[in-house]
Image (cartoon, rainbow, N blue to C red):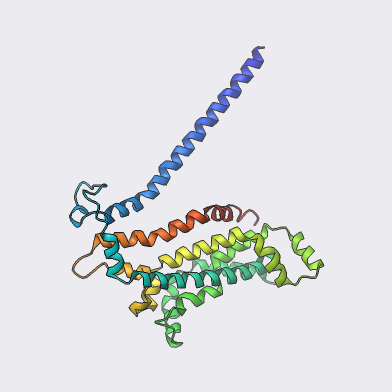
Amino acid sequence: MLAVRAEGSNRISKRSRGAIAHLITHISLIVLGLSFLFPFVWMLSTALKPEAQIFVWPPEWIPDRYLWSNFPEALTFVPFGKYVTNTLTICIWAMAGTCASSALVAYGFARIQWPGRNALFIVMLSTMMLPSQVTMIPIFVLFKKIGWVGTFKPLIIPAFFGGAFFIFLLRQFFLTIPHELSEAAKIDGCSEFRTFWQIILPLAKPALATVALFTFINNWNDFMGPLIYLSDETKFTVSLGLQQFIGQYGTRWGMLMAASTVATLPIIVLFFFAQRTFIQGISTTGIKG
């Protein structure tokens, strides 16, 4: 009888310890999440403050009066709508090119046997260690000679040649798909491309969504690429548009933060709707090496 009671008390103590650990984990995640939310809240607060309240010390989170006029003034100070359209054009084409090219190359590395496959895969991964600053000038000279400087082409066309990180990500996902599916497709008379298009790609939607989301964020936030290749203000992107709020003799901080808040919203909305697919794609990648 005493042994049964002791066993029951041990179970209860284990459950209580598990519940406490679960609670501590959630509290830690909430605190960490709030720390990541801090910059956005501060940016929104600054966007609603009068200019005189932005640099007061100690900092004030809540404005004395909400200056909502910063938002319409910021969006009319520069042709913000045009910049958003330009950025979306680059992002959509870059997403399409990256997903298509990276998926094809990753399929070749993961599902097709050919001589030198592993060695070439290592060479491809080694390109990730090459800083972009090393290739910046040679690539600019190349695009200058073929007349692409001043257009969107240098920001879009390279995406159609794949990216080492995305190829690696998709390859790892493709390795988790059973080879029996490809073998069954071949028995039914499917070509390699048809197997890739009709069987592998539909199963790889989480990984493709992850690649698309990363590509969109990278191109939406890209400042260096548009700064190097775009000189016509009608072709500026959002990141270059935000730079125009910083003048030689001063910065319009209220309008800059208002425009930055608007520029951040598409990323937040996109991740909010795609977070389940995104997390699934990340968590199921790399299970099999």
Of all residues, the one furthest to the right in this rendering is 187
Question: Residue 173: which quarter of the image?
Answer: bottom right
x then y, percent, for residue 159: 52, 73
| Position of 40 relative to 72 (above/below) | above
Picture residue at 35% right of the left edge, 58% below the top:
261
Choose between 11 and 231: the one closer to the eye. Answer: 231
Choose between 255 and 42: the one closer to the eye. Answer: 255
x then y, percent, for residue 169: 58, 61
Q: Is residue 158 left or right of residue 175?
A: left
Picture residue at 58% right of the left edge, 66% below the top:
167
Choose between 193 and 255: the one closer to the eye. Answer: 255
Q: Is residue 19 left or right of residue 288?
A: left
Quarter of the image that includes the N terminus = top right
Question: Residue 106: which quarter of the image?
Answer: bottom right
Q: Is residue 256 left or right of residue 136?
A: left
Quarter of the image that includes the C terminus = bottom right
x then y, percent, for residue 259: 32, 62
x then y, percent, for residue 117: 67, 69
Picture residue at 29% right of the left edge, 63% below the top:
72
Q: Is residue 114 visible?
A: no
| Position of 163 relative to 204 (above/below) | below
Picture residue at 25% right of the left edge, 67% below the top:
246
Question: Residue 187: which quarter of the image?
Answer: bottom right
